[in-house]
C-alpha cells in the first residue's frame, strides 16, 4: 500500500501564518476583521493588484517564513501509523523552484525540505520517510503524472482541482482534505476534514500498538503494557504499565480541528503550575508531545467517588482554598481565561442565548417543543428578574482581577479519584483558567455529575461565602447568578443535539456503546428537570 500526500496546507499548516505575515508586510492593517487563509485570499483578490499581492504573500509564506509553519493537527499520528504498518509515504507537491515576485529568490523546495528535516521526517527513529520519496512538480499535470507513476493507493490533497485532472489515476482512492459539505465530481471522492478521520478511513480504529508507538517516539519506555480506560469524557485515556512497575496515564486529546480548545496545552500547563506550587492531590505532569496531541501524567490509583459525604466536601473546599491562595500571587505564569468563563453578568446571558440560537436552528420536533413551551418562557423571566439584580460593577464589565480565581471550571467529584482513607485526587483540568468564583460555586451545585444532599449544599455555600468574603459583591452576585447558571446548564445538557457531538464521542472511544437517539431523549428529560429546579429557586433564592 503506497500512501501519497500533498504538502502545503495538507501536511504543513499556515493558518495563522498567512494573517501574521500579511499584517507584517502591510497587505492588511490592524483593523482587518477576517479570519483564516481563505477569507484573507478572498479579501486580497478583490483589491486592485490583489492577485499579485496574493502571489507575493504565498511566496513569502512558502519561502522566507516557511520555518514558522507547523504540522497539521493529526498528521504526525498518521505518519507514525504508516511507519508502524510499513506503508511507504510519498509526498508530492506542486511547488515551483522560486516564489512569484520574490526579489530574494529564496528556493521554495529547499525551504520545504529543510522544514521536513527539522520536523524529523527523515529520521529513522521518528517518521522514517525516505528522502527520495519527496517529489516536487512544476505544474498540476506533472504532479498527477507523478501520483500515477508512484502507484499511490491513496492520495490526500486539499485542492479539488488535483482530483479533477482528467488523467488522475482511477485506481487511486481520492481523499480531499477539506471541510466542504459537498462538491460535484464526476468520479468518486472522499471529502474528509481532519486527519483523525483520514486515519480511520485508511486504517480503521486506532490500535493500542499505535498509542504505544506514539508515546515511545518521545519517551524512553520499554516493555509497556497498555490498557484503554473508558468513561472519561472527551479525551481517550490509556494506562501504561512498565517493566519497572511505573504506571502512567496517557491522554490522547480530541482533534483540534473538531474542538476549538487546545486541551493539551491548557491541562498540561495547569497541572504543571499546580505541581510547582505545592499541590499534592492532583496528578503529576510527566511529558507531552504537541504534534501528537498527547499528555503523559502520573497514574492515580483508586476508584470513582461512589458516595459524597462531609469528608469529600471538606477536601473539595480545601482544594478551592488552595486555588484562592495561589490566585493571589502576582505575576503567575498563567494568563488564560477558563473555557466558558463568565466574568460578568452579560457573559452568562450571552452564552445562554448563543446556545439557545444554535438549538433553535436544529430541526428536531422534541427539542423545538421543549424550547418553545418550557425553556424560552422561563428564560425570559429569569433574564429579566435576575440579570438586573446583578451588581452593577460586574453586570456589563469584567470582574476586577483581584476578585477572580484560577478555576478548573469543570470541578467536582465527577472529576475526582478516591483512594485509601477516602483521600481524593482531583483530575481533569482541560478547561482551567481565570474565572469568577461565583461560577465555580454555582457550577459545583448545578453540575449533572454532582448529587449532594441539601445539607452538603448548604455547607458548600457557607464555605464559599466565608472564603470570598473579601469580595463585597460576592453574595449579591451569587444570588443573581444561581438561576442564570441553572438555565445555562439546561442548555449544556442538550449538547447531544449539536452537529458533530456524536463524532466527538466516537473519537473519545465510545462508539460501541453510544446511542445518539437514546442519549438525546435522556438529556432532554434532564433539561426539563433543570428548568423545574430553577423555578423552585424563586421563593427562597437569597442566602444570608
Image (spheres, rainbow, N blue to C red):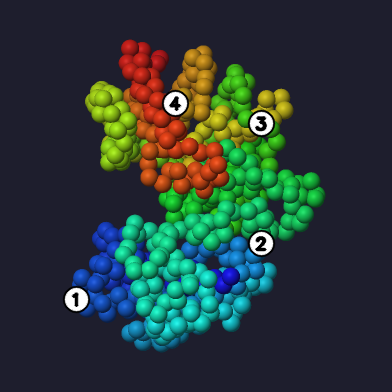
At which x and y percent is residue 105?
41, 87
Q: Measure the C-alpha gap from mark 3 to mark 4.
A: 23 Å
- First reached walking from the N terminus: tag 1 or tag 3: 1
- First reached walking from the N terminus: tag 1 or tag 4: 1
Eye-nearest disc, 3 or 4: 3
Q: Residue at x 28, y 29 (%)?
A: 369
The answer to whether 358 is drawn above or below residue 77 in the figure is: above
Q: Residue at x 38, y 38 (%)?
A: 497
- Could you classify mark 2 by the number of other residues whose Cα lies within 10 Å: few (under 14), some (14-19), or many (20 or more)? some
- Name the foreground residue: 406 vs 3: 3
Q: Which residue is mark 3?
A: 303
Q: Measure the C-alpha gap from mark 1 to mark 3.
A: 65 Å
- Could you classify mark 3 by the number of other residues whose Cα lies within 10 Å: few (under 14), some (14-19), or many (20 or more)? few
- Could you classify mark 1 by the number of other residues whose Cα lies within 10 Å: few (under 14), some (14-19), or many (20 or more)? few
* Label at residue 48: 1
Q: Measure the C-alpha gap from mark 1 to mark 4.
A: 56 Å
What kind of element bears circle 4?
helix
At which x and y percent is residue 495?
40, 38
- Name the foreground residue: 369 vs 254: 369
Q: Which residue is mark 4?
A: 446
Q: Residue at x 42, y 35 (%)?
A: 517
Q: Measure the C-alpha gap from mark 2 to mark 4.
A: 42 Å
> For residue 102, which quarter of the picture?
bottom left
* Label at residue 217: 2
Q: Is residue 415 visible?
A: yes
Amino acid at each position: 500500500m503506497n500512501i501519497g500526500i500533498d504538502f502545503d496546507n495538507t501536511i504543513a499548516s499556515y493558518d495563522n501564518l498567512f494573517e501574521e505575515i500579511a499584517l507584517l508586510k502591510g497587505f492588511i492593517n490592524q483593523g482587518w476583521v477576517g479570519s483564516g487563509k481563505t477569507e484573507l485570499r478572498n479579501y486580497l483578490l478583490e483589491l486592485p493588484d490583489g492577485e499579485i499581492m496574493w502571489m507575493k504573500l504565498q511566496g513569502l509564506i512558502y519561502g522566507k517564513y516557511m520555518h514558522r509553519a507547523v504540522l497539521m493537527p493529526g498528521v504526525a499520528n498518521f505518519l507514525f501509523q504508516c511507519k508502524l504498518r510499513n506503508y511507504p509515504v510519498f509526498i508530492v507537491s506542486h511547488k515551483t523552484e522560486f516564489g512569484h515576485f520574490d526579489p530574494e529568490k529564496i528556493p521554495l523546495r529547499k525551504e520545504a525540505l529543510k522544514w521536513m528535516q527539522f520536523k524529523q521526517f527523515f529520521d529513522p527513529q521518528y517518521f522514517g520517510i525516505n528522502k527520495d520519496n519527496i517529489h516536487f512538480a512544476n505544474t498540476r499535470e506533472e504532479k498527477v503524472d507523478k501520483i500515477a507513476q508512484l502507484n499511490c493507493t491513496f492520495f490526500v490533497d486539499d485542492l479539488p482541482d488535483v482530483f479533477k485532472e482528467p488523467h488522475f489515476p482511477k485506481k487511486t482512492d481520492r481523499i480531499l482534505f477539506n471541510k466542504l459539505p459537498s462538491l460535484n465530481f464526476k468520479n468518486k471522492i472522499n471529502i474528509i476534514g481532519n486527519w483523525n478521520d483520514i486515519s480511520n478511513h485508511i486504517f480503521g480504529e486506532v490500535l493500542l500498538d499505535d498509542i504505544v508507538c506514539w508515546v515511545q517516539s518521545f519517551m524512553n519506555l520499554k516493555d509497556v503494557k497498555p490498557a484503554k480506560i473508558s468513561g472519561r469524557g472527551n479525551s481517550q485515556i490509556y494506562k501504561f504499565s512498565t517493566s519497572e512497575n511505573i504506571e502512567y496515564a496517557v491522554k490522547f486529546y480530541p482533534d483540534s480541528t473538531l474542538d476549538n480548545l487546545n486541551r493539551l496545552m491548557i491541562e498540561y500547563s495547569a497541572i504543571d503550575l499546580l505541581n510547582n506550587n505545592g499541590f499534592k492531590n492532583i496528578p503529576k505532569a510527566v511529558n507531552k508531545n504537541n504534534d501528537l496531541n498527547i499528555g503523559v501524567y502520573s497514574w492515580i490509583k483508586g476508584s470513582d467517588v461512589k458516595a459524597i459525604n462531609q469528608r469529600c466536601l471538606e477536601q473539595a473546599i480545601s482544594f478551592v482554598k488552595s486555588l484562592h491562595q495561589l490566585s493571589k500571587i502576582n505575576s503567575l505564569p498563567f494568563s488564560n481565561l477558563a473555557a466558558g468563563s463568565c466574568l460578568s453578568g452579560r457573559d452568562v446571558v450571552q452564552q445562554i442565548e448563543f446556545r439557545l440560537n444554535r438549538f433553535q436552528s436544529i430541526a428536531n420536533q422534541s427539542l423545538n417543543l421543549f424550547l418553545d413551551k418550557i425553556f424560552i418562557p422561563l428564560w425570559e423571566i429569569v433574564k429579566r428578574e435576575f440579570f438586573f439584580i446583578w451588581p452593577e460593577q460586574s453586570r456589563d464589565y469584567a470582574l476586577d482581577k483581584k476578585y477572580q480565581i484560577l478555576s478548573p471550571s469543570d470541578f467536582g467529584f465527577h472529576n475526582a479519584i478516591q483512594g485509601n482513607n477516602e483521600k481524593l485526587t482531583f483530575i481533569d483540568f482541560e478547561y482551567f483558567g481565570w474565572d469568577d468564583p461565583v461560577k465555580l460555586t454555582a457550577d459545583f451545585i448545578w453540575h449533572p455529575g454532582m448529587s449532594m444532599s441539601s445539607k452538603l449544599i448548604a455547607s458548600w455555600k457557607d464555605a464559599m461565602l466565608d472564603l470570598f468574603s473579601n469580595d463585597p459583591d460576592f453574595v449579591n452576585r451569587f444570588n443573581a447568578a444561581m438561576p442564570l447558571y441553572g438555565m445555562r446548564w439546561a442548555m449544556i445538557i442538550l449538547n447531544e443535539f449539536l452537529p458533530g457531538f456524536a463524532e466527538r464521542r466516537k473519537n473519545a472511544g465510545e462508539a460501541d456503546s453510544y446511542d445518539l437517539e437514546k442519549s438525546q431523549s435522556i438529556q432532554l428529560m434532564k433539561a426539563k428537570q433543570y428548568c423545574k429546579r430553577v423555578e423552585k429557586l424563586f421563593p427562597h433564592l437569597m442566602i444570608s
